[in-house]
Image (cartoon, rainbow, N blue to C red):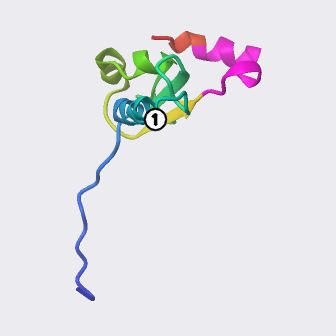
Amino acid sequence: MKGNEIYEPPRFMSVQTALEQLMEIDEKRGNPGIVGKDSLVVGVARVGCKDQSIVFGRAEDVASEKASEKLGGPLHSLVICAQGAEGLQEMEEEFVKQYQI
């Protein structure tokens, strides 16, 4: 409809939903992929605002209701930490442990 400005209501994906979908894909493929239940992840919400929230832990824990409640409403971002030798640096680890679930 040319010239007819119709706007969809905003829709946002939560960290919990993103993790559930990524872990489900991993499970269906039957091989460890990007995000397994034990992968380390950081969930952040409303970064830069007064009510920003950060949670850190295993993907399974960050996907829990407890973490979801702590993050609150949108906007959410998900950070998937590298695994193995290239994992978190000492300073990064020190910082995120403050927010461990």
Image quadrant where one finds the C terminus: top left
Q: Is residue 88 visible?
A: no
The three-letter code of the residue at mark 1 reads Arg
Quadrant in the rendering for residue 80: top right
Q: Is residue 84 magenta?
A: yes
72 sits to left or right of 88: left
Q: Horizontal and vertical percent for residue 61?
A: 41, 15
Q: Is residue 57 above or below residue 21?
A: above
Secondary structure of the residue carrying tag 1 is helix
- The residue lying at 27 percent from left, 87 percent from top is 3
The residue most toward the bottom is 2
User: What residue is shown at x 56% (from left), y 11% (from top)?
Assistant: 98
Disc count in the image?
1
Q: Nearer the viewer, residue 27 or 89?
A: 27
Badge 1 density bin: few <14, some 14–19, many ≥20, Cα 10 Å: few
Give the side of residue 40 with respect to residue 20, left or right: right
Residue 8: give x, y in percent of width and height: 24, 63
- At horizontal 29% and vertical 50% (from top left) the residue drawn is 11
Q: What is the chief secondary structure element of the magenta stretch?
A: helix
Residue occupied by mark 1:
29
Percent x, y of residue 48: 51, 36
Residue 19 spot, x, y in % from top left: 41, 31
The span picked out in magenta is 81-96
Residue 1 showing in the rendered view: yes
